[in-house]
Image: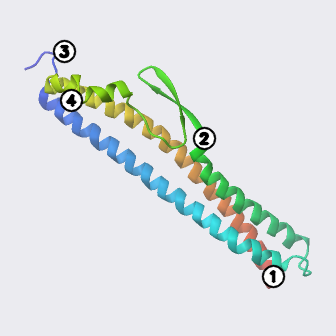
Amino acid sequence: MAEANEPIPETVSALLESAKQLYEDERGHGEALDGRLGQLTAFAGLLLTLIAPLGANQLGRGHGTTFDVAYVAAVVLFAATALLAISGGFRRRTVEIQGEKFTMTGWRRTGIKDAVLKEYSGALTGSPTVEMKRQIIADLIASYTDVRELNGLKFRLVRQVSLGLFAALLAVAAQALILVF
């Protein structure tokens, strides 16, 4: 049996596979959030282009102030929601990698310093397999942490955009009710 300080090759291999799976799962979650945000952005833009001219044709036709307010609210909410959805690509965030802080813009993912990446074709090629796998595990966990934080930001943005669309659709429903009655 190996001493407590000596890594067990089979355990290191199992941990490496587990770290890879965690990272891939989190990246997949991020890609799903990207897709959802893209769909919501397109939906807000489409409804804005449909509702703005159609509702504008009804302004001043005796539907009352409530209709006018609902129209303006719907257009403003659709436009604001679409802008909010794309704003994530311009936001700044601070990422800490091995004790150093980096400022990132947008959805850019990081988690491994460039110096460490260079080791993959340099120093790590001469390292014992177990040590190399341990380094890869550490790098994957750093990347996982960054991607998980980024996914949290994306989820909050998707939720905000969804709420904005819901409010805009309520304003459109109010317009429709006014037109029907």
Q: Residue at x 82, y 79 (%)?
A: 57
Secondary structure at badge 3 equals: loop
Across and down, in percent, residue 127 comes to 17, 22
Crowding around mark 4 (Cα neighbors within 10 Å: few <14, some 14 to 19, many 20+) is some
Kindly identify the amino acid type of the residue bearing the numbered disc 1: Leu
Crowd rating for badge 3 (residues with CA inside 10 Å; few <14, some 14–19, many 20+): few
Which residue is rendered at x = 23% and y = 25% of the image? 122
Question: Nearer the viewer's eye, disc 3 or disc 2?
Answer: 2
Q: CA distance from mark 3 to mark 4?
A: 16 Å
Crowding at dot 2, Cα within 10 Å, few <14 / some 14-19 / many 20+, comes out as: few
Say which element carries label 2.
Answer: loop
Q: Which residue was labeled with disc 4? A: 133
In the rendered image, the residue lying farthest to the left is 1
Viewer-side residue, 174 vs 95: 95
Q: Amino acid at mark 2?
A: Arg
Label of residue 91 in the image: 2
Q: 26 left or right of 58?
A: left
Query: Identity of the amino acid at label 4?
Result: Lys
Per the image, the residue denoted by label 1 is: 179
What residue would you read off at disc 3?
5
- Among the two numbered marks 3 and 4 on one chain, the one whose residue lies closer to the N terminus: 3
The answer to whether 43 is drawn above or below residue 64 in the figure is above
* Element marked by disc 4: helix
- What x and y, as percent, mark residue 50? 69, 74
